[in-house]
Image: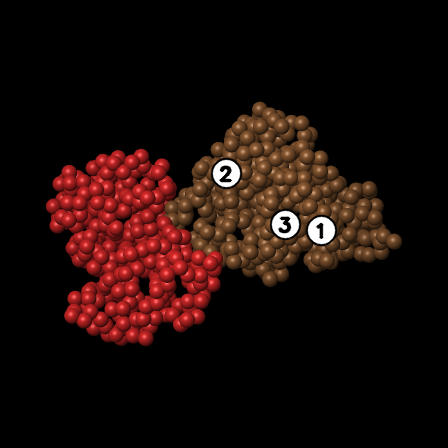
Chain colours: A brown, B red
Amino acid sequence: MPKSIVIRGGQVIDSTGEKTADVLIESGQVVEVGTKLKGDRELDASGCVVAPGLVDMHVHLREPGMEEAETIETGSRAAALGGFTAVIAMPNTEPAQDDPVIIRSVLARAADALCSVHPAGAITKGRAGLELAPMGELYSLGVRVFTDDGACVASAGVMRSALQYAQSLPGAVLAQHAEDETLATGHMHEGEWSSRLGIPGRPAEAEEIIVARDCILAAQSGTPVHFLHLSTAGSVAIVRAAKARGIPVTAEAAPHHFTLTDASCASFDPLFKVNPPLRTADDIVAVKAGLADGTIDVIASDHAPHPTETKERTFEEAPPGMLGLETALALGITELVDTGVMTLAQLLAVMAWSPANLARIPDQGVVIEKGAPANLCVIDPNLSWVLDLTKLASRSRNTPLGGRALKGKNRHTIFRGEAVVIDGQAVR
Amino acid sequence: MMKNLLSIDDLDRSGIIEICDLAESFLTVTHRDIPKVPALRGKTVASVFYEESTRTRLSFETAAKRLSADVMTMNMSSSSVKKGESLRDTVQTIEAMGVDAMVIRHSGAGAPNRVATWVDLSIVNAGDGRHEHPTQALLDVYTARRHLGADLSGARIAIVGDIRRSRVARSTTKAFAQLGAKITLVAPPTMLPDSLVGWPVIASSDFDSVLPEVDLVYLLRIQHEREDSLAFPSLREYTERYGLTRERADRLRPEVLIMHPGPMNRGVEIAPEVAESDASVITEQVENGVAVRMAVLYHLLGSGAAVA
């Protein structure tokens, strides 16, 4: 006997606008949006926003192969706590998600996860950048986002071929980790701080050259290209110009790229090491402007768990990446909404319905109305809190934001009609 | 009291001068029949070198022994590091053995900074990646002051070579600048820092125009064994444009000082005759290195009792 849930008294925001209403959920669907609704169970949403569940286009769940860092179970719990009801799992697993067997295995393991897990397929076999992965076979299993993330598809010839091949896969999007590996040989942004610290650099032009190249290839093929974690002012300008010419490109920004600068690396703490690297204050201004004017379509966390001991090395030896699922929303509110870069509704657009559309996930990010699939989050945009690393649901702890004061937090998450997070606690 | 020497930034101008003055008194010790003082008796200094080194390691160990400290040498090429132990575990193990100071060299920039967050003992940076080599800078300043006078303000210094990849350049530049010297970095553009923001220097790629103006030429070792072959086309071309050849040495001011942190590539960045000339104080730098490292260890670990 399915029980109904009523979300009481929140401000409902979706792509059509906002209104104060109760939301009644039953059998995995929204059955009514209105006032004084009654259900078997009540979730208080006073002072909160009820929105389509957030969608993170860029997470590393590390399963299979690196389960000491994260698993689909722990990663999806972190996602649900962060307000996400769907994630795209990057293919740099061991083995890589470049084969139908691996995709099926990830889908099977994700069957009882706390959010919807969509494995991205690799563009090339083993993400080695040489031969095309069986994109059509992966497409048949529902894969729509293809990427070699963690690695750039370095060869223009391979990228052009992949884009042409994908013309036969309607709705497929190729996502590029844009860093020219012959330039991005170091470990932090190349500039004032890398020169002072003696840490070999990854220059801005390493990213911008690939972004420019792939805009040209996207125009030529007509296949959409999505740029992962755009981080430089130059990249934002290139994407803006390409969009103005009607080239089918989209872009994302990671919260750390609009929050932290390369000056943080002066601590030599590898918690600040990410690829692409933390950039300058000017780049942060440009990324924020790109988010505000729609040049950058989505915010994605690039949640990249690593075991503690791998970060207890020197900056140069430690692997790149930081956690993001449990802090992305708060950084969006703290750094973008509170600073006037965008409204909360605009933030929800780039964190919920835009990524759902971009990643072609039809039952996510939809308008909250009768008959809609019940994938929702209830967030308290005004809650001030401090990140306690010991409370993270992720199996890893590699974020430099421990102890940082943040504003805005997810309170309840409804996934396929089930309340999987209630008052900031995961139910399983 | 200062606990660590991770960067030359840990010392201000007066701190640098204090180390130099201390080194002066230790230099007299090293000239005695029994070149040893009991200043650090009962203290243990661990020498932890993750990267090959002959002179720096010997210099530190000699300095510690002349202060009567016990020296514990970790051979990292045959230790548990090879078995995959993390840097943190290794240094905490060494700390647990009751060590008072750790002299650490590592191929990664900031390794000593990281170690200092994990252990309570004193850390001395003996060279970390391309970041810093503060005791080299101190011995350079000490040596320069002995010849150019205690006050280096206005002294014109050219530092020549692969600045971008040099930890020596990062430390020595700042140390000389603290004492008021005017520094010109000389290198092909591919060997200059990517950014000079915050560097108290000017930069030039024209050695010949800088040459006649300077009081001190500081040559860096050209690391031709490095894989980065894109920095310059050939050793021959480097020598032609940036080597301190005999012809270039003839155009230097007569009272000029020539320094090099070693080991030298004779015939590449410096002509053999120039290295042996009266202007060269390269061997003296090595000798002074022991006294300066005694001063650093004493500064960090000493009780403050009279030295002599």
Q: Specify the subunit that label 1 lies on.
A: A
Q: Specify the subunit that label 2 lies on.
A: A
Mark 3 secondary-structure assignment: loop
Q: Is residue B150 above or below residue B93?
A: above
The residue wearing badge 2 is: A179
Name which residue type carries label 2.
Glu
Which residue is at a point 44% across and 70% down the rendered structure image?
Answer: B96
- Tags 2 and 1 both on a single chain: yes
Left/right of residue B234 with respect to residue A38 in the rendered view: left
Few, some or many residues within 10 Å of mark 2 (<14, 14–19, 20+)? many
Closest to the camera, between mark 2 and mark 3, is 3
The residue wearing badge 3 is: A63
Q: Residue furthest top?
A: A220
The residue wearing badge 1 is: A113
Which circle's residue, 1 or 3, is located before the other in the chain? 3
Few, some or many residues within 10 Å of mark 1 (<14, 14–19, 20+)? many
Q: Residue furthest right?
A: A1
